[in-house]
Image: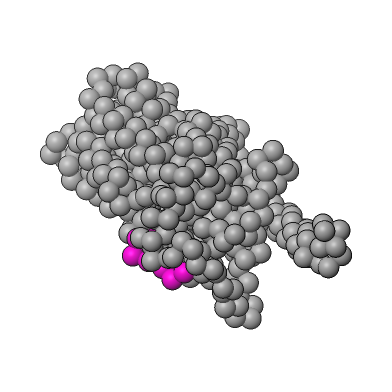
Amino acid sequence: MTTTRELVNSAPISRLQIRVLIVCLIANMAEGYDLLSISITVVPLADAWGLTGTQTGLLLAMGPVGMAVGALVLAPLSDRYGRRSQLIVSLVTITAFIGLSGAATDVTQLAVFRLLTGIGMGGLLPILTITIGEFAPLRRRAAAISFVSVGFPLGSAAGGAGAALLMASAGWQSAFVLGAVLTLIACLLVVAFVPETPDFLDTKNTPDVKQKRADLLTRMGIDPDEKTETLPSQPSGSSTSQDRAHDVGFAIRSSQMGAVALLFLVAITTQYFCSMWLPKLLVLAGMSPDGGSSGVLLLSLGAAASGLAIAALSTRFSLFTLITVFAMLSAVLLAVFSLLSSDLAFALVVAPILGLCQCATSVSVYALVPALFSADNRSAAMGLGIGISRIGMTLMPLGVGILIDMSWTPEAIFQLMIIPTLISVALAYYLWRSSRSAAVGRSWKAAAATSPASSDMSA
C-alpha cells in the first residue's frame, strides 16, 4: 500500500505547501519577537518599579523555564491529537499571557505571566518544525525547516525596532501589546491556512481520517490512489541526511534519543552563550561598551543568515556533515576569538561568521529530528530535545556568572565553550553510524521478505 509520505515525496510542491511554509515563517517571527519582548522592556521596568538585580534576573529566566515545560509537556500531545490543534493552542496561550503581561502591576504578576507565555512558546517551536517537515517532500525537508528558522531572528530584529518606537510614546506596556497582536495574527493565519499534516493523518486509520487524508492530498494536487515512482537519483556527492535516515524510526526510550537530547543541549546552549554573554565578555576583555554591543549585533546578523545557508547546502550535503563542519568551524572561531577578543576590528569581522556557524549547527539539529523519528513519536522527540536545551539555557548564565566571580578571564571562558562544541561533532558521528546501521538492517529485512526462499517458507 502506498503511504501518504511516499505520495508527498514523489509529487511537485503545491501552493498549499507554500502557504503553510509562509504561515509557519510568520508564526516563527512572532515567537522571535515574543521571546525578545521581556529583554527590551526590562530596562524601563527596572526604572519604573525599582527592580533589584535578582528580580530582573527572575523576569529574564521565566521565559526559558516556561519554554522547557512547554516543550516537555505540550509538544508530545501533538503525537496524539494532531499538529494543527497544538499550533493553535500554543498560539492562543502566547497571545493571552503576553497580552496580560502588559497589564501586570508588580514583578510577581509579570513573572507568572512570563512563565505561562514561555509554556506556550515551548509548545509552539517543536510543532512548527514538525509541521514544516511533514508538509515538505523529503528531498526539501531540511531546506524548508532552515528557511522558516530565519523567521526567529527576523522577528526579533523587526519587532524590536517597532517596539522601541512604541515604548517611546506609549510606555513599556505597548511592547507586550504588540506581541499579543502579532501572535494573534499568526494564530488566525494558522486557523485559516494550515490543515492537519499528511504524516499525522497517515498514523490514524478511522474512516473520517481517511477522508481527510484524501481531501488533503487532492488539495495538494495529488491523486490519493496513485502509485508512486522512484524519484530521480541525486547528483553524485549530493546524498542527504534525509535520504540516509528516512524512516529510521528511533524510539523515544533509546540511546539515540539520549544522544539527540544531548546534541540539542550542547549546540543550543553554546549558541545562546555567545548571544547572551558576548557583550559582557568583550567589555571585560578591554573593549568599549559600544564595541561589545556591535559584536552581538553582528553575531545576530550572522545567525539570521544561517537558515538560508542551510537551506541551500542541505540539498547537496547531509545534515550530519553540516553539523560536523559548522561545529568544527565554531570551535576554531571560539579558540581564535579567545586570543584576540579585545581587538575591535577583528571581533567585528569574526562575530557574524561565528554567529552563522553556531546557528547553522542548531538549525541542522532541528532539521535532523524529523528524519530520525517516525510520525508517531516525532513531536515527543523534538519536545524532549528542545526542553532539555532550555534547561541548559537557564543554567548556563548562572554558571558563566559564577566563573566570572571566580576570576576566570573572558579568554578562558571562550576556550571552555569549545568543549561542548566538539561534543556536538562526536554526537553527530554517533547518530550517523546508528542511522546507517538501521538502514542496513531494513535492507536485510526487505531482501529477506522478498527472496524466493522467504516466499516458499511463507507458502
Nearest to the observer: residue 389 or residue 198: 198
**Up/down of 95 relative to 144, above or below:** above
Q: Is residue 123 left or right of residue 180?
A: right
User: Image check: 365 left or right of 419?
Assistant: left
Q: Is residue 420 above or below residue 140?
A: above
In this rendering, the count of numbered labels is 0
Q: Residue furthest bottom?
A: 236
Residue at image position (63%, 53%) is 372
- Which of the pair 451/430 is nearer the observer? 451
Is residue 263 or residue 81 the one in the foreground? 81
Residue at 35% over, 39% down: 88
Quadrant that contains the C terminus: bottom right
Q: Is residue 358 magenta?
A: no
Is residue 254 something that shows in the picture?
A: yes
Residue situated furthest left in the rendering: 169
Residue 42 percent across, percent down from the top left: 31, 33
Vertical side of 82 occupied by 151: above or below: below
Task: Say whether residue 385 is visible.
Answer: no
Which color scheme did the rendering employ for the protein? one colour
Hey, which residue is sitting farthest front in the picture? 459
- Seen at 81% across and 67% down, the residue is 451
- The part of the image, by quadrant, that contains residue 396 is top right
The vertical placement of 94 against 225, above or below, is: above
Q: Which of 149 and 153 lies nearest the eye of the viewer?
A: 149
Residue 227 horizontal/vertical position (percent): 54, 68
Across and down, in percent, residue 148 comes to 41, 57
Where does the image place residue 370, in percent across and percent down from the top left? 56, 53
Q: Which residues are magenta?
A: 11-18
Quadrant showing the N terminus? bottom right
